[in-house]
Image: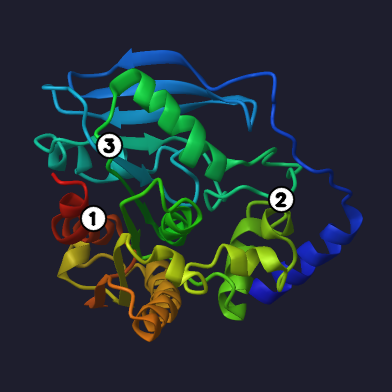
Amino acid sequence: MPLVALLTVSLLWSLVVVTPVRAQSDKDTRIVGDRAITDTHSILDVYSPSMDKVISNDILRPASGGALPTLYLLNGALGNEDGVGWLNNSSVADFFADKNVTVVIPIGGRFSFYTDWQSPDPVLGTYKWQTYLTDELPRALEQRFGSTGRTGVAGLSMSGGPALDLAAQAPERFDAAASLSGCPAPSNPFATIGISAMIAGGMNNPFNMWGPPGSPGWAEHDPAVNVEKLRGTALYVSASAGRPGPVDRIPAGAVPPFGGMAVEALVNYCTSLFVDAVHRHGVPATISMRERGAHTWPLFEDQLREAWITTIGPALSV
């Protein structure tokens, strides 16, 4: 099925004429809304000139406030546009309640892989998420909250590999990066097919992202290929073999999550390619390859806690 989807999209690609994306040079990043939800949770609306739209961001900060380090926490395949994300499906708000860190969770970016797409997509529009996350949003956050200058980024599933890619593309921006059951080797042929099929499944053209399979863009955004660019960044990577376990907290008698089991097995393979690259190059990283876990939210949450304790928190001096 992934191959059929890829061939279908290839045909569509031959029929689509695209034009380069140009940033709105006459406009600048600005905060257009700031809504308090609780004493420690707010929503910051930021205008992105590169995408020419307003993006909402969930913000978690301790009630004490002040200038703090920043953690960008990226959502999964649909970017929480469907209500499925860190805040609704995990207890991250409770976990970070007593941590001296500003947690920023962008809302949006479905199927974006949080990168700058080479061409606008007829369905998704203009995607410049790397520009937004490494330049526009940080400037807005600095204006609103200040910062200690220490920054980390973590992603799950779709956004796991991109979290490492963002750190490789902007090493001066991030002190720590974590991939939680993601794919940090997208230029591998099997990974390229899977990623392309995933994007095409949403009726989008995956070749608008980094070009057709084998194009330079796929390798340019491959953390396993660019692992040397991550030297000096505190790294955490984790994936499971795909077998359900206690970490998934599946109720007794429930139908096993067969889809999640298959996806986790695939990202486990993809993550192992990055781990091999880390070992070949001698780049330090915290590696957590697990026997149990089935691409569930309880698994992601457990990985995030481990990543924070072992890697992200120390790197941000929290």
| Amino acid type, residue under disc 1 in the picture | Leu
Q: CA distance from mark 1 to mark 3?
A: 13 Å
Residue occupying image coordinates x 30% and y 63%: 235
In the displayed structure, 187 sits above or below 221; it is: below
| Snapshot quadrant of residue 234 | bottom left
| Amino acid type, residue under disc 3 in the picture | Val
Q: Could you tell which of marks 2 and 3 lies nearer the N-terminus?
A: 3
Do we see residue 250 in this rendering?
no
| Residue at image mark 2 | 118
Q: Is residue 94 left or right of residue 187?
A: left
Question: In front: mark 1 or mark 2?
Answer: 2
The quadrant of the picture occupied by the N terminus is: bottom right
**Label 1 close to label 2 by CB (< 8 Å):** no
| Residue at image mark 3 | 103
What is the x, y in percent for residue 170? 47, 50
| Snapshot quadrant of residue 254 | bottom left
What is the x, y in percent for residue 92? 21, 43
| Amino acid type, residue under disc 2 in the picture | Gln
| Residue at image mark 1 | 304
Q: Is residue 118 left or right of residue 12?
A: left
Residue occupying image coordinates x 62% and y 79%: 189
The quadrant of the picture occupied by the C terminus is: top left
Label 2, residues with CA under 10 Å away: few <14, some 14-19, many ≥20 = some
Do we see residue 208 in this rendering?
yes
Between residues 49 and 123, which one lies in front from this camera angle?
49
Between residues 157 and 139, which one lies in front from this camera angle?
139
Q: Label 1, secondary structure: give it.
A: helix
State the colouring used for the structure image. rainbow
Q: Could you tell which of marks 1 and 2 lies nearer the N-terminus?
A: 2
